[in-house]
Image (cartoon, rainbow, N blue to C red):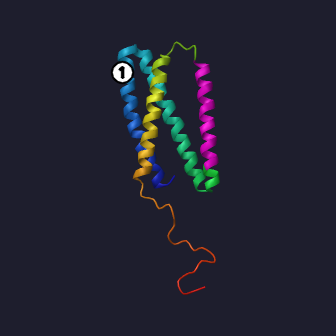
């Protein structure tokens, strides 16, 4: 992982952890221990899913832009599939509060997405390499 990737991860993970902490406290106050557990599991699911995606895309970006896009789409579809399976497996669970879980996942996903976008906007990366030589282009006196 490059330094830019770590900055983006930090920009998304820190606010999400704070939102998750608030969600766990609110869920504990409103729904007791089951609410706190549901919210805690929700925070962990969001953090794990988005961190794995960011690491996969960062690794694939070193290979090629095509692989980066494939990794982004593949990790997105894998997250959707795994989340659907998790929701189906635990749909009848009485261990935690499913409403606290769902609301925490939604809040943390929104927070992570905003944090990640903000992290990207704060990066000062060049989109074009200014030293690139294009074949056949006039090079200032040489041909």
When asked about the image quadrant of residue 110, the answer is top left
Q: At 55% from the left edge and 42% from the top edge, which residue is drawn?
A: 53
Q: At 55% from the left edge and 71% from the top edge, which residue is drawn?
A: 132
Q: Position of residue 52 (x, y in %)?
A: 55, 41
Question: How many dots with numbers?
Answer: 1
Of residues 21 and 140, which is closer to you in this image?
140
Q: At 63% from the left edge and 36% from the top edge, which residue is drawn?
A: 77
Q: Position of residue 21 (x, y in %)?
A: 37, 29
Q: Position of residue 127 (x, y in %)?
A: 50, 60
Q: Residues within 10 Å of mark 1 (few under 14, many from 20)?
A: some
Residue 54 relative to residue 104: left or right:
right
When asked about the image quadrant of residue 141, the answer is bottom right
The boundaries of the magenta stretch are 69-90
Of residues 97 and 122, which is closer to you in this image?
122
> Up-down: is 50 above or below 121?
above
Q: Is label 1 in a helix, a strand or a loop?
A: helix
Q: At 42% from the left edge and 54% from the top edge, which residue is drawn?
A: 123
Residue 7 at least partly seen: no
Q: Would you say residue 78 sits in the magenta stretch? A: yes
Q: Position of residue 143 (x, y in %)?
A: 61, 85
Q: Which residue is mark 1?
A: 26
Residue 95 at least partly seen: yes
Q: Residue furthest front?
A: 138
> Up-down: is 22 above or below 78?
above
Residue 54 relative to residue 36: left or right:
right
> Up-down: is 97 above or below 20?
above
Residue 41 relative to residue 87: left or right:
left
Of residues 17 and 121, which is closer to you in this image?
121
């Amino acid at each position: 992982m490059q330094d830019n990737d770590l900055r983006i991860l930090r920009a998304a993970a820190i606010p999400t952890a704070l939102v998750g902490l608030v969600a766990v406290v609110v869920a504990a106050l409103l729904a007791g221990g089951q609410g706190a557990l549901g919210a805690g599991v929700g925070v962990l699911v969001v953090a794990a899913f988005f961190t794995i995606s960011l690491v996969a895309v960062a690794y694939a970006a070193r290979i090629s832009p095509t692989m980066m896009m494939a990794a982004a789409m593949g990790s997105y579809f894998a997250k959707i599939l795994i989340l659907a399976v998790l929701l189906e497996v635990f749909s009848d669970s009485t261990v935690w509060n499913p409403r606290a879980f769902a609301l925490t996942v939604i809040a943390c996903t929104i927070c992570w997405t905003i944090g990640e976008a903000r992290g990207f906007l704060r990066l000062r990366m060049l989109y074009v390499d200014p030293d690139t030589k294009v074949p056949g282009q006039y090079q200032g006196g040489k041909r």
